[in-house]
């Protein structure tokens, strides 16, 4: 029986990193999950991601290497800061199948973060606030973003996916400098304003409104919603899962 090991930044305080693995959203036979940064037992199929792990994937402690092991990246960020990168090249060589969360990166299959499959998106309540801010716990001060006390806020270092989705859903307009904050807001159909700090924010299937740390307070009426985002993301996820299932079946035959 084929042994599957799912690996990502599972031990992260960032709820987006902690809850981005497809392990949590589908039933898997003979499977386990662990943090990519810890050594692994032997396995036949490794499924890595999501998150921004692709650059360092090939050198991660969790990678088990054997001639018969298959490697799959799922929902990973593949946008590079520079056209040529040895680290990205090594990760591409490692993987038998790559699903990129970055729409438009035609080198790979499109595979948005598998957290779109959570039933929490079907249970969201109507907004309670005009505006909320879901902020990145490690980047907000560095960006010089000051959030007025009048705007409800929550850090991406919050305790659970349930708390994060409930908070984001509570805003008619959501401002975020967290990748998953923007992604989940779009999935919920909320008007979304993104304050990016890197190019990883430029690959959403539908664009939010982009603001800056200096002007975002003047753009609160400019948020963009994507009513079809949830359905399209789930369909893309199921299509990529079918390819993963096929590769797993090949290992079993």
Image: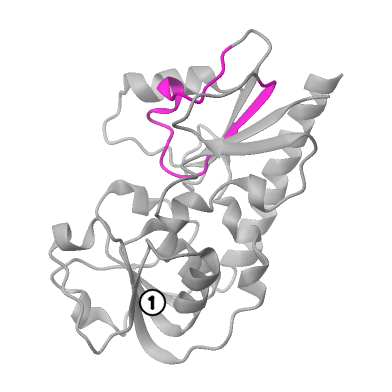
* Residue drawn 72% across the image and 49% down it: 238
Task: State whether residue 27 is above or below residue 163.
Answer: above
Query: On the image, which quarter does residue 221 sit in?
Result: bottom left
Kindly report the secondary structure that dominates the magenta region of the rendered protein.
loop
Q: x, y percentage for residue 192? A: 40, 73
* Residue drawn 13% across the image and 70% down it: 214
Label tally: 1
Q: Can residue 207 be spotted in the picture? A: no
Q: x, y percentage for residue 241? A: 71, 42
Task: State whether residue 13 is above or below residue 77.
Answer: below
Residue 179 in magenta? no
* Residue drawn 72% across the image and 36% down it: 31
Task: State whether residue 75 is above or below residue 209.
Answer: above
Query: On the image, which quarter does residue 177 sit in?
Result: bottom left
Residue with the mark numbered 1 = 174
Mark 1, secondary structure of its residue: strand
Q: x, y percentage for residue 98? A: 56, 32
Image position of 8 (left or right of 153): right
Is the residue marked by circle 1 packed among few (<14), some (14-19), or many (20+) residues within 10 Å? many
Closer-to-camera residue (128/199): 128
Closer-to-camera residue (155/128): 155
Residue 58 in magenta? yes
The segment highlighted magenta reads 43-65
Image position of 196 (left or right of 43): left
Query: On the image, which quarter does residue 253 sit in?
Result: top right
């Amino acid at each position: 029986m084929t042994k599957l090991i799912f690996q990502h930044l599972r031990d992260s305080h960032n709820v987006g990193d902690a809850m981005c693995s497809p392990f949590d959203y589908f039933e898997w036979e003979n499977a386990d999950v662990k943090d990519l940064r810890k050594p692994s037992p032997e396995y036949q199929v490794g499924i890595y991601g999501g998150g921004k792990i692709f650059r360092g994937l090939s050198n991660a402690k969790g990678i088990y290497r054997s001639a018969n092991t298959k490697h799959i990246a799922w929902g990973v960020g593949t946008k590079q800061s520079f056209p040529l990168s040895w680290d990205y090249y090594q990760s591409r060589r490692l993987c038998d199948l790559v699903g990129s969360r970055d729409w438009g990166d035609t080198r790979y299959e499109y595979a948005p973060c598998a957290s779109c499959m959570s039933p929490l998106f079907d249970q969201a309540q109507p907004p309670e606030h005009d505006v909320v801010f879901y902020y990145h716990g490690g980047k907000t001060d560095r960006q010089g973003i000051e959030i007025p006390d009048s705007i409800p806020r929550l850090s991406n270092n919050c305790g659970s996916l349930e708390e994060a989705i409930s908070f984001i859903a509570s805003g008619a307009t959501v401002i975020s400098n967290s990748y998953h904050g923007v992604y989940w807001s779009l999935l919920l159909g909320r008007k979304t304003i993104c304050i990016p700090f890197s190019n990883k924010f430029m690959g959403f299937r539908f664009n939010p409104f982009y603001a800056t740390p200096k002007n975002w307070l003047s753009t609160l009426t400019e948020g963009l919603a994507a009513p079809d985002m949830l359905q399209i993301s789930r369909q893309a996820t199921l299509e990529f899962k079918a390819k993963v299932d096929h590769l797993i079946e090949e290992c079993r035959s």
